[in-house]
């Protein structure tokens, strides 16, 4: 089955080499005016100037989709989220409004452990149904690939339950889900005062079982004062690597923990949050293959300082943007809102945010060779936006703005009732 998308006012392909974009490259993407995209069997066959695409012999006889002079670009690749949970943390929300800190709320039984309690009590079918409903919202907002973490179980059975829910929803589509094991998210109540024992259990029991069942691609750790140390992170990522899982690190969110340097030293695919990063950390990221994933939605929701995105970009780090969607510190699935925050609060340019949310997000999931740009052979994941200028995408916020969304060559959301 072939589809030819024409009458594209601005086409941003994000095309380039098989590597994340860094420094000035992030701002060097220019829209193709009057572009076209040819899709065959769920993949991009050709993308670029209309005349060149129409000269491709495969374009003849293709089903025509008229983009109406609007903007088309790759679907968002959201490389950091926590979308499996049983209920939002509304009490925490109100406590923060009344002046309580993240740490104070956690100490009083709120925060991560309150979600853990509810997830442990939920059935796998209930978690699956909740995730399926949220997946539809991501698709409507233009996200076609989503990293989905566990981490609200903190024991073998519940972590498996969460990851099986992720596998079930991802295999059913249309949203592509990439599972990440985050058992090292917090120390569970039954291991209070015995963190080292819990880390050993994560490394010797949970990681091998999850990897053996093929339920995750990555292993992650919350490297933060009061949670897990740099040495803990090293142990967890080493155990993950032994089991065939690549590493990710929550680093420098609340304090300068050393997690970024640990992530770089262990060749983690990404270091995420990074609000407290110092210049040596940024330079280490710039000299490495580790993607710096910034999550400004959580800073907005928690009223925390934003990371210095300009410094990351100017020093040559590969920057990605993601939602950090979760029930406590960022209940936002809309990448468009994240891009708007990155522009207005972090001084990223509109095109830099789009690069960060597509091709760099793909590299933050080890998917840069197949996702994140509209190039021949890559997944036909693209969005037609209700916009005539790509800068409108972060400019307007409060609604998704996606006219239609294509995943693997199929229209999976459309305000215009497009049917293939």
Image (cartoon, rainbow, N blue to C red):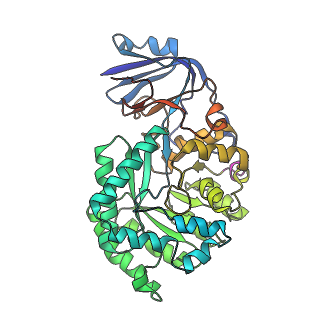
Q: Estimate the x, y position of residue 234 in percent, counting from the top left.
A: 49, 73
Quadrant position of residue 22: top right
Residue 239 can be seen in this image: no
Q: Is residue 319 left or right of residue 24?
A: left
Task: Residue at 43% x, 40% y: name it.
Answer: 139
Quadrant position of residue 226: bottom right
Q: Is residue 31 left or right of residue 407?
A: right
Q: Is residue 122 left or right of residue 53?
A: left
Main secondary structure of the magenta stretch: helix
Task: Residue at 43% x, 56% y: name it.
Answer: 83
Query: Vertically, is 168 above or below 157?
Result: above
Quadrant where the image shows the N terminus? top left
Q: Which residues are magenta?
A: 312-316
Q: Is residue 206 left or right of residue 101?
A: left
Task: Residue at 27% x, 58% y: name it.
Answer: 125
On whether residue 297 falls in the magenta region, the answer is: no
Task: Residue at 45% x, 28% y: name it.
Answer: 415
Q: Estimate the x, y position of residue 210 in percent, counting from the top left.
A: 31, 65
On whether residue 315 falls in the magenta region, the answer is: yes
Using the image as rendered, state which of residue 285 and residue 50 is in the foreground.
50
Residue 386 can be seen in this image: yes
Using the image as rendered, state which of residue 194 and residue 39 is in the foreground.
194
Query: Vertically, is 188 above or below 55?
Result: below
Q: Estimate the x, y position of residue 231 in percent, counting from the top left.
A: 52, 78
Q: How many numbered dots are placed on residues in this image?
A: 0
């Amino acid at each position: 089955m072939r589809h030819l998308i024409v009458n594209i006012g601005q086409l941003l392909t994000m095309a380039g080499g098989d590597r994340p974009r860094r420094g000035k490259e992030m701002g060097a993407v220019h829209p193709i005016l009057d572009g076209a995209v040819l899709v065959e069997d769920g993949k991009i066959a050709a993308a670029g100037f209309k005349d060149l695409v129409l000269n491709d012999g495969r374009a003849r006889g293709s089903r025509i989709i008229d983009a109406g002079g609007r903007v088309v670009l790759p679907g968002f690749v959201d490389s950091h989220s926590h979308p499996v949970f049983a209920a939002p943390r509304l009490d925490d929300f109100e406590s923060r409004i009344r002046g309580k800190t993240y740490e104070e709320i956690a100490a009083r039984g709120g925060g991560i452990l309150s979600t853990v309690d509810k997830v442990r009590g939920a059935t796998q079918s209930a978690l699956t149904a909740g995730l399926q409903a949220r997946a539809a919202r991501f698709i409507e907002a233009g996200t076609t690939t989503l990293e989905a973490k566990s981490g609200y179980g903190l024991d073998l059975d519940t972590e498996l339950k969460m990851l099986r829910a992720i596998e079930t929803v991802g295999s059913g589509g249309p949203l592509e889900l990439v599972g990440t094991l985050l058992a090292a998210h917090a120390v569970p109540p039954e291991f209070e005062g015995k963190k080292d024992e819990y880390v050993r259990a994560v490394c010797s029991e949970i990681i091998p079982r999850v990897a053996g069942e093929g339920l995750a691609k990555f292993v992650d750790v919350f490297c933060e004062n009061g949670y897990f140390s740099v040495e803990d992170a090293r142990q967890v990522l080493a155990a993950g690597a032994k089991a065939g899982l690549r590493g990710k690190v929550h680093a420098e969110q609340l304090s300068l923990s050393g997690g970024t340097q640990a992530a770089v030293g262990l060749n983690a695919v990404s270091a995420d949050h990074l609000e407290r990063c110092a210049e040596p950390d940024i330079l280490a990221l710039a000299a490495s293959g580790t993607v710096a994933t910034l999550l400004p939605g959580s800073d907005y929701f928690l009223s925390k300082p934003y990371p210095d995105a300009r410094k990351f970009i100017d020093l040559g780090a590969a920057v990605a943007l993601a939602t950090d969607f979760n029930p406590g510190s960022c209940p936002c699935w809309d990448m468009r809102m994240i891009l708007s925050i990155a522009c207005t609060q972090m001084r990223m340019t509109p095109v830099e945010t789009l690069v960060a949310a597509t091709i760099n997000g793909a590299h933050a999931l080890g998917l840069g060779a197949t996702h994140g740009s509209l190039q021949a052979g890559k997944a036909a994941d693209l969005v037609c936006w209700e916009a005539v200028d790509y800068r409108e995408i972060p400019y307007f916020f409060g609604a998704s703005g996606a006219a239609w969304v294509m995943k693997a060559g199929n229209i999976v959301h459309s305000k215009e009732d497009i049917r293939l």
